[in-house]
Amino acid sequence: MTEPTASEPTDDGRPAQKPVQLNDVADYEDQLEEHDLVLLEFVTSGCGICASMEPVLGAVARSAPGAVATVNAGLVPALTAEFGVQRVPTLVVLKDGEEVARLDDGFQSADTIVDLLETHAAH
């Protein structure tokens, strides 16, 4: 698994994070063990909307509660099938390992994603 990269600290002093790249099911399970709240972004190579979401997910990783992880749907078919991903990008929010929200209708703003995560972090 690729570790998040620290850069500038966030407003609350935490190190800034980048989304974690999940390369297999074991990486996914590690994230579930480490975090109560996990955002999975399913992408594919060559997806223009997915590429445009990269900086958005970087901003989300720096400010949102929980973990932010990216899954290449073509390289981790077991997770893609487990979540029934039919199109990319698909964002899946997990709370305590259970799916609590999904966004699969194209580009999403950082504010929309952070609001969604904060809503579920509060429950």
Image (tube, rainbow, N blue to C red):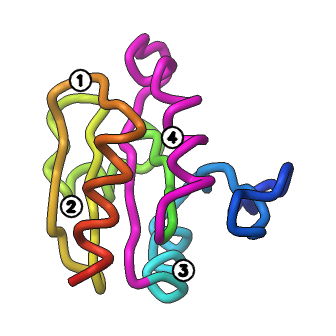
Which mark's residue is nearer the viewer, 3 or 1?
Answer: 1
- Name the residue that disc number 3 marks: 30
Amino acid carrying label 3: it is: Asp
Q: SS class of the residue under badge 3?
A: helix
The span picked out in magenta is: 36-65
Residue hosting label 4: 57
Q: CA distance from mark 3 to mark 1?
A: 27 Å
Q: What amino acid is labelled 2 in the image?
A: Glu
Dot 1 or dot 4, earlier in sequence = 4
Indicate which disc residue 82 carries.
2
Distance of label 1 from label 2 (alpha carbons): 20 Å
The residue carrying mark 1 is 106
2 vs 4, front mark: 4
Q: Amino acid at mark 4?
A: Leu
At numbered mark 2, what does the secondary structure look like: helix, strand or loop? helix
> At numbered mark 4, what does the secondary structure look like: helix, strand or loop?
helix
- In the rendered image, the residue lying farthest to the front is 11
The N terminus sits in image quarter: bottom right
Is the C-beta separation of discs 1 and 2 under 8 Å? no
In the rendering, at what x and y percent does residue 40 appear?
38, 55
Quarter of the rendering containing residue 14: bottom right
Label 3 Cα crowd, 10 Å radius (few <14 / some 14-19 / many 20+) = few
Determine the CA span between mark 4 and mark 3.
20 Å
Q: Is residue 42 magenta?
A: yes
Image marks 2 and 4: residues in contact by CB distance under 8 Å: no
